[in-house]
Image: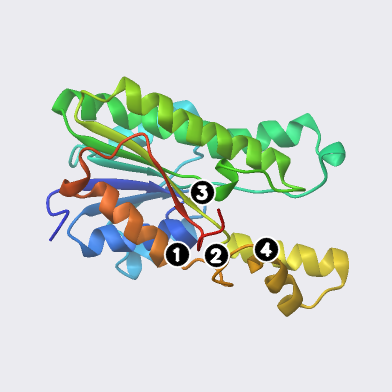
Amino acid sequence: MLLAGRHAVVTGGGRGIGRAIAATLRRHGARVAIIGRDEAALASACEAGDADAYAICDVGDEAAMAATVSRLAETQPIDIAIANAGAVETGPFLRSPAERFRRLSEINLIGTVNLFHAALPGMIERGDGRLIAIASTAGHRGYPYVSAYVAAKHAVVGLVKSLALETARSGVTVNAVCPGYADTEMVAGGIDTIVAKTGATREQALAEMVKANPQGRLIAPGEVAASVLYLCGPGSGSVTGQSLLINGGEF
């Protein structure tokens, strides 16, 4: 059991990539707690055996995140913190008000900051830990009509690079995993938006999304989870400050 005795927390762990990560870590021996706002989804993941416990928390609320992580750590110190919670909104830049940029930054960037702030002190004290942000290929390049999302994910990748240098001698590693379009509810919602706005069929909308991926397909959540598993394992101690692209060779 690769992660036996380890305690992991995963934000946005009730569905999609977050749930796949939680299930994978638990399957390899970790105790896993998932954090989110949708209690039904979180409870369902626990009932299915994909996580051991859940907590309701708005990742953008600094005090609430600190209290939640502290409470979860009472049973066992946190060894692994996965900042997966995220959101996207679409629209051309000139119809994307500053409030959209603030909103997406609050979820994608500040949510990551809040989790890392809460989990890192204990890891440094013990001289061991893993911080991982689930970013996006949008953290490396631009895409039209999602400028607020791209800006937030670029910020997440920058945070990872900077924090990795600060913690390089602490025993804690800090990395990002950056998938392209994945087979998740978020992407399904994007397809719905394309269909509604353009009149295209779902098949045409999906084809438009995957055309940038040389493999011509969506990324499976389990593929992202497998990369996270590696970064959590004992063989990745010198891998820090990295941003692992999972994009079928897109760039």
Q: Nearer the viewer, residue 151 or 214?
A: 214
Estimate how packed mark 4 is, as few (under 14), some (14 to 19) or many (20 or more) residues with alpha carbons within 10 Å: few
Instruction: Quote the CA–CA distance across marks 1 and 3.
Output: 20 Å
Q: Position of residue 54 (x, y in %)?
A: 36, 52
Q: Residue at x 22, y 37 (%)?
A: 238
Instruction: Quote the CA–CA distance across marks 4 and 1.
Output: 16 Å
Estimate how packed mark 1 is, as few (under 14), some (14 to 19) or many (20 or more) residues with alpha carbons within 10 Å: some
Judged left or right of residue 188, residue 9 is: left
Q: Nearer the viewer, residue 228 or 124?
A: 228
| Vertical position of residue 48 compared to residue 96: above or below | below
Instruction: Quote the CA–CA distance across marks 2 and 3.
Output: 17 Å
- Which is nearer the N-term, disc 1 or disc 3? 3
Give yes or no for contact between labels 2 and 1 (Cβ–Cβ under 8 Å): yes
| Vertical position of residue 52 compared to residue 142: above or below | below
- Which is nearer the N-term, disc 4 or disc 3? 3
Label 4 vs label 1, nearer the camera: 1
Q: Amino acid at mark 4?
A: Gly
Judged left or right of residue 106, residue 240 is: left
The residue that disc 2 covers is 184
Residue 221, label in figure:
1
Give yes or no for contact between labels 4 and 2 (Cβ–Cβ under 8 Å): no
Residue 189, label in figure:
4
Determine the image quadrant of residue 200.
Answer: bottom right
Estimate how packed mark 2 is, as few (under 14), some (14 to 19) or many (20 or more) residues with alpha carbons within 10 Å: some
